Image: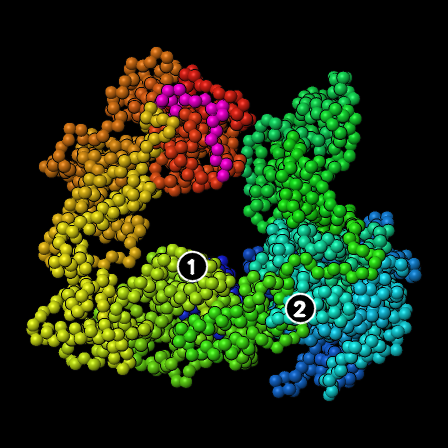
Amino acid sequence: MDKSWMHADRRSKEFELGFEEFLKFAESNAVNIDKISCPCKKCCNVDGFSVEVVRDHVFYYGILESYKVWRWHGESMYDNGVESESESESESVNGDPGMGENDVEVGESEDEEMSEDSNEFLKFVEDGDQPLYNGCDHTTKMNFLVESFSWKAKHVVTDSCFGDFLELVKGLLPAENLVPLTTNDAKKTLSVLGMDYEKIHACPNDCILYRGDAVLVDAEECPSCGVSRWKLGRDNIPTKNVPAKVLWYFPPIPRFKRFYQSPKTAKNLTWHDWGRKKDKMMRHPADSPTWKLLDSKYPELGNDHRNLRLALSSDGFNPHSMQNSLYSCWPVILVTYNLPPWLCMKRKFMMLTLLISGPKQPGNDIDVYLQPLIDDLKLLWNGVEEVYDAFRGEYFKLKAVLFWTINDFPAYGNLSGSVVRGYHGCPICVDQTRPRRLKKGNKLVFMRHRRGLPRHHPYRRQAAAFDNTIEEDLAPVPLTGEEVLARVEGLNCEFGKREESTPRVRIVDDQDRPCWKKKSVFFQLEYWKDIPVRHNLDVMHIEKNCCDSLIGTLLNIPGKTKDGVAARLDMVAMGIRTELKPDVSGKRTKLPLASWNCKLDEKKIVCGSFFGMKVPTGFSSNIRNLVSMEDLKLSKLKSHDCHVVMQVLLPVALRSVLEKPVRYAIIRFCLFFKAICAKEIDVSKLEQMQADLVVTVCQLEKYFPPSFFDVMIHLTVHLVREVTLCGPVFFRWMYPFERYMKVFKGWVRSRRHPEGCIAESYVVEEAVEFCAEGLLNDDASTAGMPENSKPEVFHASNPLSAPTMISVYGKEMEQAHLCILQNTEDAKNYFSEHMELLKLLHPRFAKDEKWLKDKQNQTFSAWLKERVSNELQNSGNTVSETIRWMAAGPNNVVATFSGYKVNGVEFYTKQRDDMRTVQNSGVSLVADVMLVSSAKDKNPRHDDMDFYGVIQHIWEVDYYKFRVPLFKCDWVENVRGIKVDELGFMLVNLNRKGHLNDPFVLASHVKQIFYIEDPLDPQWSVVVRLPDRDYKGFDSDEEEGVHIEEQAFDLPFVETYDDIEGDQDSNYMRPGDEKIYVMAGSSTSSLNARALALRTKTKEFLRKRGRSEVANEEASVGKAATPRRSPRSTKVVVVDQTSKDAPTKADVVLPRRSPRSTARTSKDALNNARVGPAKATQSKKSVASKKLSFGSMSNSGSGKRKAGKSKAGKSKAGTMEVVESDDEDEEFEADEDEEESNENVTGGMRLLRRGMVTMSRVNRRLVRGRKLKVKYNDDGEPVGRAAKEMQSYIGVFARTKVPINVKDWRLVPLSVKDNIWGSIEEAYVVPKQWKKMVFASAGQKWRDFKSKLTTWYIIPFMDSPELFEFPPDDYRSIHADQWQEFVKDRISPQFQEFRQKQMARRKENKYPHRLGRKPYAQLQEELAATVPAGRKLVRTTMWKAARQDKDGNYLAPQVQEKVDEIDKLEKEEQEGKRKFEGPVDVLTTALGTPEYSGRVRGVGGFVKPEAYFHLPKRARLNLDARQRIKNGEEDSSSVLAAERAQWKEEKAELVGRLVRLESLLMGKDKQIVESPKSATLINDLGSGQGSCSRLDKAGVGGNEVEGVKAIKKKLDLEEGKLKTQVEADEVTKEQAPEKPLTVEEEAHVMEMAQVQSSPTVQRHHLVIDSLDNIVAEGTIVEVGVDSSSQTVHGVPLAAENIRVSVSKCLVENALLPVPIRDEIVFVSDAIGTCVAWPKDWVIPATAVGNAKQAPRKYGRKKTKQWVDTDKDDDDLEHLPADLPPALLSLSKWGNEFLKDRATIHTKLSKDLFGTERKIALFRSDLFAFTNVQEVAGDTIVMYMSFLREKLKESNMLNMIGFVDPSSLGVGNSTDRSRSFSAALKRGKPGQFFLVPYNTGKHWILSVVSPSEELVYFMDPMKRRMDVTTDEWRTIVNQFIKQNLMLFDSGIPEQIGDKSCGYFIMLYMREIVQDKEQNWTKKWLTRGDEKYTMQDVDVVRQEWAEYVLKFTSN
């Protein structure tokens, strides 16, 4: 991983790209993305923040360069490979502009029109004909350039990268090729096309353009404002020829000529004449009255359909993509409406004409920059001669007209000159707008919408319901163009931005203020005054603002709601809805819930509905990410999100909330936007749509506060007028232009010249798009015309997943085949012919259409096959190719997919949808169906019907020549499963399934829909239809990503549910007791309220802690909690009306605040609430200073150094300097605990006077690359000031990096501990052996930290659980989920009981020390200086000093007593009266208690007693027991009894660990110990040997515990050792390890020990029968206990065997002397594991070949030297008379050849169980099978292999699988469940498995279907689930969580007590033979079936026939 960027300047591109990769890496490995460790030089990975804050920190403070291993961000600290030093390619942002993106001079040329006869064009044509290199016949130079530049534009390739690409290609091609050397050479070749641009200098104050007359062209300064034309240098001196501001002009006339030079484009430019559908519907601007008006008024324009109709759009954007940048660049874009709808808004045909450079927006002075474009538009209006039409091959005169402009509302005012704010803020109503100013809210509201109602509408007379006035005026009539021109004719506007000596006075209340600011520059166009709508209102921005207002007000979102105290007071002032006035009585202001307020439960319903919505791919963003269920709000909605929410999702989410009139008014308002945005508009319904909208807005006026009605709500009433005059909305909104501006941003390569980058990239793309039409293939895609917009691509269908092959037979395949035939055009005639034939054959039913149709469906496929076959025999047949292949029928092997793309739409199966965040499985179908009233209806009628379903499977049916995609769906029943409500919502019940006999549908016939759960009734779902992605007549989506209605949509008519006749005031108050609690002030007022609630609870607690600053904190909290009130800053939350106390959790919802999303004012207010006003002010100053200094900072010099450098000087980056602590006093100067920044406030409690300790001085030292050396004393303890600092630094990581919800330090992941150790190594020089000490110290500090959290933040506040909602603000590194789990544990009764016990234990400590945080090692260092030379500092001195205060006094009397006693004993020792040695020294004798095992009193916790007192390490008695024995308090027998009891408990664990170690060490991955503590060994269940005779219906007993004798022997040995130690009186107990080694760790240790001692390990030969027959090599494994009681894989070793580890196999097919049935039979299978081997057959390798050396013997010679599991005396000669023939032959063969341990063995195919499986049948197995005795596991496996062959013959391998029973027989339940799960996961979708299982003495069969999560248990004894099957049920239940059922119906019950295995084989046989797989239904209906002996013989015959194939082996 390249980390070289860490040393680069952080302003460079290299650093930016590298750091972004680092953030991605950290985010992908983060446990909590809001708590990522910050690697800046300030935090040094101690603090954790969100990604945004980490990014800000690093770019401000710089990154910690010594942080080479990203251990805190997921990188392993053991990955110490050499870091890559390769430099990533970057581009300079500060270099001089050259050619390419940074070239701002290229293109500065005269405006030359290029004709066909120009030399440049001829040269261009010649270049196009030249081959790319000599001999190249497939491409030319121009083809290569166009294709390469198209690739560059599509993938946004940089110029430098493209230059390297050209250099690479040129080197690969033959010499003298024509590939340009550089990017600039390639651009020059394309520049001859005439696609140039002009650079026009402009006044920096936007006064003039330096163009036109000669005076302006040569002027040096602006004649209007006097500002220099040139850019000022650093000394404020103008730089000649460097303009201060530039307008980039792209002349449109040459570009329009280029349009017509392309035949394809020239044809499309007249589509509006020949390709448009002309009816009463409006689909295109050509259908609008404006188009027709201009054609009729100016015939010369309308007579030639090639004349252009244009629209203009302009808006500002930030090219730097930085939110904090104020740079604004303004492009002006033209679109051509002559083109078809699917092309006119495409990127290729959006023409950039002007690019106004920043950094300031032009504002009202934009007319200055539009003047060059206006001049060209005048020329186009008069006509441009000699324009060549390549499609028609003629020249013509081109005219063009500008229809209108498209802008957001502020730009609307700039372009039109209208006033868009204030009393004349509506540019349509102008001076008739008549808004009203609210006194309290100080805002204008627009509430005169009743003027749009009919004259006698009842709403006009309802005063109290609206604004307390009766409306008598009519709606204002919009002014015509002539009227507007007459009003603005006399306006004189002086352009330019000048500094005024006196500030402008805003006259906002002047209602006589003019309605226009200027005369628009567009009135220079002759026709402009004749256009009805000259400037369009942007529906995109209006819709977004309306959506934000609605959601913010309904959900009461702070900052978004239009409700509040001021809004209520304004209603009171207006005399309306006075019952909603604020309640100011009491300490809190309360607002009654109004009609527009959702209750708390309703908020949860609305947000929950949004949170559960899943939409199709590409429909919108993930709605779930926009919902905060914690805060009950929607946030971060983009424009398109609001578009989808407003038109589709919000009406559904509101279905069950609010009062019905309010809800219906809102839904109708939302559906209005859906109706107006349709692709097709029914002109006849527009008038009614306008009337409905006005009524809807008036209803909103009745139910919403006046403050809700801003200008955006008002503008909606004018949208229908614009649709009527201009056409569909999607031709006139900002979506395509906003997307195009995003492309402009991607073109910016240089921040110094963003406009130059955009201009250069645009010119190149323009040239490529033009050349691509002539030089590239028709199907080639470019950046302007992407691949998905082409019809052939759009119609393509392809899978979206890998195929899974299944075999399908029977009815299901017939249904799929019939579905395809019914929808094949070539088959229609055959259906008609077949129907006539049926009528002739069945004259009785000739008139029964339903009967005939059913009959045809049953017989048509077979008839068609015969019919076509007969017809093909005729030579002159007319059978089509499609029918030929279809008639033969499909392939039974079907490919299934989880996803399929059809006509550009992605479809998924329901199973795939459930695992994703999208919903692509919903489909609808309109089909012609036969409708019958009843089963006897003989006169059905045909009609279209809608069907709704969910895709369950996707098939690709193979007809050998072609494939047909099919969807298999679950369809909803049409009668009871579908309904429509009064609002027009279609609802379906997905649980009601119908049409079960017709589940298939062609993939191309369905339309995608999706379902949203109905909030009213969860059983029902609302159907949401997706609009067609193609325009009528062409298959492409002209608006990618913006879904709009295809058909005209009508607003539903519903009852208004209000009294529209009377004038009485309705009740607008919501029922219930909920109120709105108002907290005025900043947006953090909820935090202030929490501070008030917390103040009283923390006051007493802080005093107990001795905090003198309580009063100061109270003062700061009080000030923060009562901020200055402001009518515009109000936050409201829902509370309970009956509450009288301070706000609780139910009252105040405390949001978790994001540092990036919180405004700076909110942060400052938060600082006031937390740290007081003084510190808040200081914080603001520091932030300001940071902003000022950021620009001049680099990565290497970010932090301020302290006065005085270190003696070692400055270190290089990336190296560490070792510093001696004594010489670096500045490292330890007083450095108080740093205050944490407020960037990551959690909302939790804050009790600390200072912030959490972060050890910033260590971080500063790390930044300088310096390490501190730690000193140690004689005992090995760290001492000195560096050690003290190191301990604090360890505490920082223990508190911030270790989860607090971990129960025990030993359970903390080792990776976390290693990271702590790595961080300590980076900062200090410490030896490796002190790693354990660091872990111990970290563990202690971590435990102390948890105790502090408990005693400070939990115990005092247990009566206020609402305070536990968030982690404490003092420790913001704590994750919220960890905190909640920690609190839950600490407040539990179990912990409280434990805490009381611990408190009682602490009270028993009579002699507590007073060291505080000072360790004994530091005390020892201080006291050592006072000890005279030659004397040793004893621990009694330290013990006494640790209990003294600063005056040297002992405060506790009991301490003083012990001190006196210590002095007395020391005096006696000095006088020789007493002698003390070892652990029984003066201190032990004085205190009267022995030492603990883990530490030494008076010395410290890191010194062990055995090290301090020099005691032996291996001891069994602890010091306490030893002291009691010496004192005579107890005798050795009692101590031995206690120890014996302890060993007894360890007995079971000892055996278990030994066996588990064997398994892990020898490579065996199957555990055989169920529980180490119980030491219960599970017998091998895989063998299957046993009898059912000992079983009864109640079950079987458990297994007996083994290994007791071995443990007893070990105990006897230990007792002997113990007695010897007691008598010698020289023993002590070794301290128990802090963390016992796990089995895995012990196995690793043993492996290391074996490697280290390998030279001494003796290799042995393993033989069989004789010393010469060496079959393997291995090593003896001795475990130290008697082997007679041990087992190996469940097989007892016995006295004659020994445990060996097989390392090498010499004879591959040799059998083990002691085989493990069904698991390990061959020696080759035993490699890497331990097995039992006869002792006499294990011979040292040195003994071979040495005749004099006798073989090694182990133990006494036995008569029987090995366990013969296959006796030759199994009688295969005297056989039963009724044996099946094959079994008889096999038995005779076995009687002859299966002797001397010979076997029938083979290796089964990997396809059976997923892995290769060796199998061996012994003589005993054949004997048992012949005599119908118990069946072994391998016997059943052999029959399963036979059944697999049968499945292969029937093509059913994909339907049924098998699981090896031996894989389920060894290990505990967890291990067997894993094996079971692994076996099932190898299966294929839809496949079920046959799983034989031996419960110990009995076989059962399980049939498992993973896809359906269904398991059938089949027990031949028909027992219920009892103790014999409980374990197997547990194993299955860990994989299949539901549908575990006992299947006993129709299952034959076994005969005899040993026939269970045979019945299992019969069950499997019957299942495999059922090709239709309907065995469950058959068995359930066949009653009590019985198997006979003849049935068993069938199985035995088949088994024997199959086994005979392997007898040759």
CA–CA distance in space, label 1 to label 2: 39 Å
- Residue at 64% x, 36% y is 993
Quadrant of the image containing the C terminus: top left
Residue 692 percent location from the top left of the image: 82, 55
Tell me which residue sits at (44%, 60%) in the image: 1383
SS at mark 2 in the image:
loop
Nearer the observer, 1000 or 1281: 1281
Please rate how many residues cluster around mark 2, counting C-alpha atoms within 10 Å: few if below 14, some from 14 to 19, many from 20.
Answer: some
- Stretch of the chain drawn in magenta: 1938-1958
Is 1646 magenta? The answer is no
Residue nearest the observer in this picture, 1254 or 475: 475
Residue 154 seen in the current view = no
Amino acid type of the residue tagged 2 in the rendering: Asp
Q: Identify the disc placed on residue 583.
A: 2
- Residue designated by label 1: 1387
The image position of residue 1780, as x and y in percent, is: 39, 15
* Left or right of residue 815: residue 373: right
Which image quadrant is residue 1293 in?
A: bottom left
Q: Residue at horizontal 29%, vertical 63%?
A: 1401
Q: Is residue 1328 above or below residue 1236?
A: above
| Three-letter code for the amino acid on which mark 1 is drawn | Ile
